[in-house]
Image (cartoon, rainbow, N blue to C red):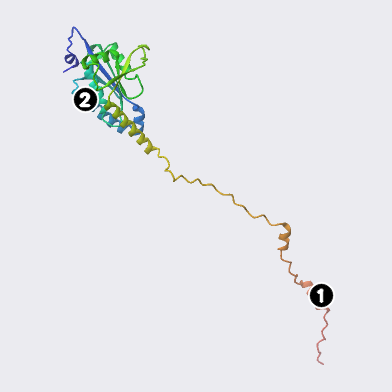
Amino acid sequence: MNLAEWAGVTDYERRATLAVVFTDIIDSTTLAREVGDAKMFEMLVKHFDAAREVSLYCDGFEIKLIGDAYMVAFKTADAALLFASQFQQHTGDPRIGIRAGIHVGQVRIKDDDIYGLMVNYASRLQHALPIEGIYLSDFAKKEIESERGTTQTDFRFVRLPANLPSFGENEVIWQVITPEIREARIARVKAKREREARKNPKPTAGLQPIEYKPQPVKLPDPPSRISLQRRVAPPEPESPTSDALGGILRRLTFPPPDKKK
């Protein structure tokens, strides 16, 4: 089944009112640098497999993948919210957290894709805050309240100050809060801190690193000139030379030898 058949449009009238959801991964670049391309690719495959499983359960129609972003359409706003809340709890990997933007409006359908200003609006919603969460347009919130009532206790809406690029500063945006989403977010934050602690361990208390400080070595003072002279041995007496011996021998007298007659 193609998108036009799923949405119930014809070649003569390609317009339909749909709930559009955009999701993207929080800090995907930082995560990719930590785990590397090969591991990040495996994580993305599991992530999008989880998205398709939840989308099928909520009767959604996948539009396309845009990098680490997922775009899917639903026939009602409450189905879109169910998808976003379930997907945020089960992203395919505990290290992955997502933001989701939901808007309801009229689109035009062609070749399994959707076009219109509301598509751009939904894309802006997912970047309403730089943190994990589900963000709704005011119209999507009213559609959900019309279906689920204003006194339900499964979730609550928190109004946010909004400044959507190209749409002005006075847009009304709502964040969806549920106990399950809060628990999943807390678990991911805790796991992230544990990974950072393992990556940059702190010294254990009582076992501080020892800093080596070399001690100066004191050399003895050099000996004085007098002490050096005292240590010099006296010269030995010189031996008489051959000239002196010759003089002594000449002064000696010997008796002449006897002559035979």
Question: Relative to 171, does residue 45 appear above or below in the rendering?
Answer: below
Where's residue 231, x and y in %?
A: 70, 63
Q: Quadrant of the N terminus?
A: top left
Q: Quadrant of the C terminus?
A: bottom right
Q: CA distance from mark 1 to mark 2?
A: 132 Å
Q: Which of 62 and 84 lies nearest the eye of the viewer?
A: 84
Question: Relative to 197, does residue 220 appear above or below in the rendering?
Answer: below
Question: Relative to 125, does residue 35 appear above or below in the rendering?
Answer: below
User: In the rendered view, does 242 fall on the left or right side of 31?
Assistant: right
x 81%, y 75%: residue? 247
Q: Which of 214 and 76 lies nearest the eye of the viewer?
A: 76
**Residue 21, located in which quarter of the rendered image?**
top left
x 18%, y 14%: residue? 7
Q: Is any atom of residue 225 visible in this view?
A: yes
Most extreme residue toward the top is 12
Q: Residues within 10 Å of mark 2 (few under 14, many from 20)?
A: many
Q: Is any atom of residue 74 visible in this view?
A: no
Where's residue 55, x and y in %?
A: 21, 23
1 vs 2, front mark: 2
N-term mark: 1 or 2: 2
Q: At label 2, which amino acid type do we have?
A: Val
Disc 1, disc 2: CB below 8 Å? no
* SS at circle 2: helix
Q: Which of 153 and 96 lies nearest the eye of the viewer?
A: 153
**Residue 200, located in which quarter of the rendered image?**
top left
* SS at circle 1: helix
Q: At label 1, which amino acid type do we have?
A: Gly
Where's residue 77, x and y in %?
A: 23, 16
- Disc 2: which residue: 54
- Disc 1: which residue: 247
Give the numbered dot on residue 68. Answer: none
x 20%, y 26%: residue? 53
